[in-house]
Image (cartoon, rainbow, N blue to C red):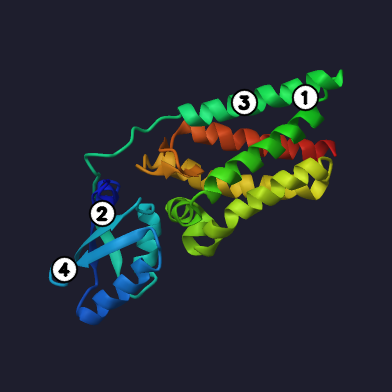
């Protein structure tokens, strides 16, 4: 039988930060309350005397998100940081599931175009977008709370509005259905472009900062690393949405 507590701890990330401005236990309480407002943060330990705070989460948010939470709770600021990453994990990070799914989507939509007797780029992109959003929303919905926590750790909207992580799978589902029913609708393309652009900002920031964060594009079913592959994926979706909007 699997020890769920042990598996949870093995997936935990940890970071230690130094906070200036702490003068009493009320300060500690205010900072803890602010940090726990981000559901990705599971445990906070603050030493009032030294100002040292240890945070644990699955995974932890970006450092700048943590800083904003702390500095927004009062006259405090983070002036030193150090990261400690877990040593052992239960699964190996790999892009294999993502690449297989994308290959199936590309192959399947190309076959649809070949069967129609005439290849049209706009039709192919609409079919690909429909399949992409339907499949990716499916994996997110397998465990929406887990996805929301992971997404909150790097998405700029979900970091400030945790509810967005719970709604995002349904946004993708709606876009998938919209591309199936209204493939030439300008509003669908525009909404897709906005959603992908906002998502891309968080991904780019993660890669630039070299944050050890799980990519949640396929939910948390697969342990996908955050890297330039994710940037390319989101950028292509954004480019297709913009292209279809301009061609509409």
Q: Residues within 10 Å of mark 3 (few under 14, many from 20)?
A: few
Q: Residues within 10 Å of mark 2 (few under 14, many from 20)?
A: few
Q: CA distance from mark 4 to mark 1?
A: 61 Å
Name the residue tied to disc 4.
47
Q: Residues within 10 Å of mark 1 (few under 14, many from 20)?
A: some
Q: CA distance from mark 4 to mark 3?
A: 52 Å
The kind of secondary structure element at disc 4 is loop
Q: Which of labels 2 and 3 is toward the front?
A: 2
Q: Which sits earlier in the primary sequence, circle 2 or circle 3? A: 2
Q: Position of residue 26 (x, y in %)?
A: 25, 81
Name the residue tied to disc 2.
5
Q: Which of labels 4 and 1 is toward the front?
A: 1
Name the residue tied to disc 1.
112
Residue displayed at 68% across by 45% down: 193
Q: CA distance from mark 4 to mark 2?
A: 26 Å
Q: Which sits earlier in the primary sequence, circle 4 or circle 2? A: 2
Name the residue tied to disc 3.
104
Q: Position of residue 203 (x, y in %)?
A: 49, 43
Residue displayed at 50% across by 47% down: 202
* Viewport quadrant of the C terminus: top right
In the rendered structure, the answer to whether residue 114 lies left or right of residue 36 reads right
Decide: marks 1, 2 in contact (CB < 8 A)?
A: no
Answer above or below: position of 137 versus 65.
Answer: above
The kind of secondary structure element at disc 3 is helix
Decide: marks 2, 3 in contact (CB < 8 A)?
A: no
How many discs mark residues in the rendered view? 4
Q: CA distance from mark 2 to mark 3?
A: 36 Å
Q: Position of residue 54 (x, y in %)?
A: 22, 59
């Amino acid at each position: 039988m699997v020890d769920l507590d042990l598996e949870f701890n093995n997936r935990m990330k940890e970071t230690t930060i130094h906070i200036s401005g702490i003068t009493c236990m009320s300060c500690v309480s205010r900072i803890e309350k602010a940090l726990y407002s981000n559901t990705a943060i599971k445990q906070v330990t603050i030493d009032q005397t030294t100002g040292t705070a240890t945070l644990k989460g699955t995974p932890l948010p970006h450092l700048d998100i943590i800083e904003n939470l702390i500095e927004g709770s009062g006259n405090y600021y983070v002036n030193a940081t150090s990261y400690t990453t877990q040593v052992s994990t239960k699964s190996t990070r790999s892009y294999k599931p993502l690449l297989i799914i994308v290959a199936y989507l590309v192959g399947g939509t190309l076959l649809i175009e070949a069967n129609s007797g005439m290849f049209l780029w706009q039709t192919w992109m609409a079919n690909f977008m429909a399949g992409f959003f339907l499949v990716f929303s499916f994996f997110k919905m397998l465990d929406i709370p887990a996805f929301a926590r992971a997404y909150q750790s790097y998405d700029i909207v979900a970091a400030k509005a945790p509810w967005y992580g719970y709604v995002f799978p349904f946004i993708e589902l709606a876009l998938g259905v919209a591309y199936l029913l209204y493939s030439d609708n300008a509003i669908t393309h525009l909404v897709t472009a906005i959603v992908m652009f906002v998502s891309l900002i968080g991904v780019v920031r993660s890669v630039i900062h070299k944050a050890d964060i799980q990519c949640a594009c396929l939910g948390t079913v697969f342990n996908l690393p955050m890297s330039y592959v994710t940037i390319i994926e989101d950028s292509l979706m954004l480019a297709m949405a913009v292209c279809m909007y301009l061609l509409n």
